[in-house]
Amino acid sequence: MIDLLVAQHGRIKALLEQVLVTEGQVRQQAFDDLVRLLAVHECAEAEVVHPASRHHAVSGEIVDSRLHEEQEAKHALASLYDLGLDHPQFDSRFAAFAERLIEHAELEEKEEFGQLQLQTSHDERVRLATAVRIAEAFAPAHPHPEVGGSVAANLPIGPPTAVFDRIHGALREWRSQSSIA
């Protein structure tokens, strides 16, 4: 599980960099990929990783801090998404968002994942990786800051919202490829 999440953090950092340095359709695609990956990744962490951390007595303060940061990131990402890449304030807001997100990922890896590594067996981490993949399969494809970060909050909205988000995304992509506004 930890290897899976750290690899996703690497992919997130690469997408952040792509959005910062590219232009046009490449930048839009990188941003869209980032939005999808973050929505799915953070939902899976909220549903699987943070509860596992609490179960294994990772400091509640650490878990609460990561959840708070993730909730702030959901709001910031939703705001950036609504703002759009062409908005004059997008670049400065995105740069600040990227900096906070990288700091969050590094704290998560050092504090939370480090403790989980010590307190779980290899077999348990393999089972948790499977649970993360299942949670990601049913996670919303876009940030929904109004949902919150708890398992109870995400589970009822996750599958239906994921379907809606994927349909909405597919239609938007079809429209853009078909030149239909």
Image: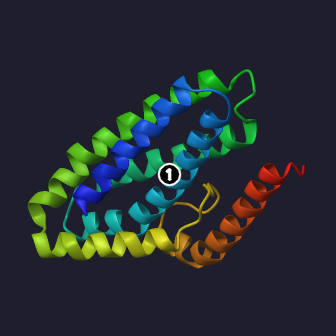
Locate residue 168: give its quadrant: bottom right
Residue most toward the right?
181
Locate residue 165: give its quadrant: bottom right
The x and y percentages for residue 96 are 52, 26
The residue lying at 44 percent from left, 29 percent from top is 99
Secondary element type, mark 1: helix
The x and y percentages for residue 62 are 29, 50
For the N terminus, give its image quadrant: bottom left
The residue lying at 39 percent from left, 45 percent from top is 11
The residue lying at 31 percent from left, 75 percent from top is 130
The colour scheme used here is: rainbow
Q: Can see residue 126? A: yes
Q: Decide: is 74 above or below 18.
A: below
Q: Decide: is 50 above or below 67.
A: below
Locate residue 125: give its quadrant: bottom left
Give the residue type at disc 1.
Leu
The x and y percentages for residue 178 are 83, 53
The x and y percentages for residue 76 are 60, 40
| Left or right: residue 36 compared with residue 146 | left
The residue lying at 74 percent from left, 28 percent from top is 86
| Left or right: residue 172 compared with residue 34 | right
Q: Residues within 10 Å of mark 1 (few under 14, many from 20)?
A: many
| Left or right: residue 14 compared with residue 154 | left
Q: Which residue is mark 1?
A: 38
